[in-house]
Amino acid sequence: MSGGPGLESLVDQAISVITNDGRNIVGILKGYDQATNIILDESHERVYSTKEGVQQLVLGLSVVGELDEELDSNLDLSKLRAHPLKPVIH
């Protein structure tokens, strides 16, 4: 695999990722690519609150990284069908 510096030594280890939008995702690093998109297994998001304790939302297998805008723009959203996303609880 090629990617960010030092990531190879972290494969199959538990890591904590803080995204640009402030989310904290914890999981087992399973892979990454040259753009430093990462694959986390057994992941969960830690949601912090000033009024409640920290909530942990189970995510399972997750891909964390940048949106491929070219691929996304080629999707015909009018033909896609899926169950609605569950709301995020803060």
Image: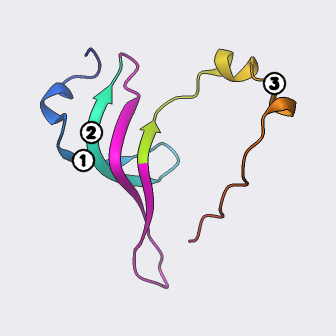
* Viewer-nearest residue: 83 or 1: 83
Nearest to N terminus: mark 2 or mark 1: 1
* Viewer-nearest residue: 43 or 82: 82
Q: Position of residue 19 (x, y in %)?
A: 44, 44
Q: Are marks 2 and 1 in contact (CB under 8 Å)?
A: yes
Residue range highlighted in magenta:
34-60
The amino acid marked with disc number 3 is: Asp
Q: Position of residue 68 (x, y in %)?
A: 59, 21
Q: Position of residue 66 (x, y in %)?
A: 52, 29
Looking at the image, residue 36 lies above or below residue 29: above
Q: Name the quadrant containing residue 35.
A: top left
Question: In terms of secondary structure, where does tag 3 sit?
Answer: loop
The amino acid marked with disc number 2 is: Leu
- Residue occupying image coordinates x 66% and y 64%: 87
Q: Circle 3 is placed at which residue position?
A: 76
Q: Give left or right: position of 60 versus 80.
A: left
- Give the distance between the C-alpha atoms of the residues marked 3 and 2, in whole angstroms: 31 Å
Q: Give left or right: position of 60 versus 69.
A: left
Question: In terms of secondary structure, where does tag 2 sit?
Answer: strand
Q: Circle 2 is placed at which residue position?
A: 29
